[in-house]
Amino acid sequence: MKFYKQKIPGVFLIEAEPFKDSRGMFFRHFCKKEFESNGLEARILQTNVSQNSKSHTLRGMHYQLKPYSEHKTMLCISGAIYDIIVDLRPDSATFLKWISVELNAEEPVSLHLPAGCANGYLTLKDDTSILYYMSEYYVPEAYKGLRYNDPMFKFTWPVEPRVISEKDRSYPDFDPQIVSKAKNTF
């Protein structure tokens, strides 16, 4: 596995080193030793799969508050996504900055997000599925989100979302003062 640091500290693209033969392809998506040797959280408490039937489906921008902040490692297992990651850690040099990456099923590349970052993605193809490894359990009271079109962040999506949940559509505008009031929240 090859680990590539991104512009937000703790965010990595992880390139698998696949073995290919006449049967197809085999690769590792997770290795505790390799994650730890690259300074990444290697605890997995929950695994999720998100299946999306339509292209231009938006999920996010989600995160969990402390003490349930979660590290995520994501792999696109069918289709393709455009993912945005936002740094919500007040002490980070990239606080309130965001980056985007594309993942697709043809390339065995995973995305690792540290706790304290929100992320959301837009499917680029029909029948897109994402596999997630999470370092924390889902806790409804700690589960929060940012709106995909929040004017503070000026997110750039490749196309306008066509399918989005009411919950994801209705998050209020982000108030940076909530972060300064609660530095231990993210």
Image: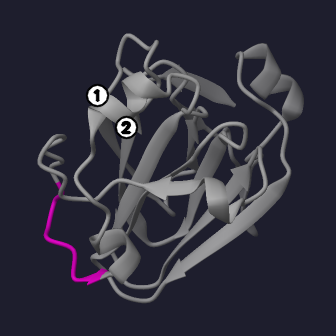
Q: Which of 186 and 1 is in front in this view?
A: 186
Residue 42 visible? The answer is yes
Where residue 156 sits: x, y (%)? 15, 50
Question: 81 or 119: nearer the eye?
Answer: 119
Which of marks 2 and 1 precedes in the sequence? 2
Left or right? Give the position of 142 relative to 116.
Answer: right
Residue 37 picture location, percent across and down: 79, 15
Q: Residues within 10 Å of mark 1 (few under 14, many from 20)?
A: some
In front of the other: 6 or 66: 66
Mark sitting on residue 97:
1
Q: Is the magenta stretch mostly helix, strand or loop?
A: loop
- Is 160 part of what is drawn in magenta? yes
Q: In which quarter of the image is residue 8?
A: top left
How far apart in space, not on screen, are marks 1 and 2 (Cα)? 6 Å
Asked if 91 appears above or below 125 in the picture, the reply is above
Q: Per the image, is 120 magenta?
A: no
Q: Do the residues labelled 1 and 2 touch (CB within 8 Å)?
A: yes
| Residue under numbered circle 2 | 86
Highlighted range, magenta: 157-163
In the picture, measured across the screen, residue 87 lies left or right of residue 46, that is left
Q: Residue at x 42, y 26 (%)?
A: 181
| Residue 178 on image: x %, y % | 38, 35
x 63%, y 53%: residue: 142
Q: Which amino acid does label 1 sit on?
A: Lys
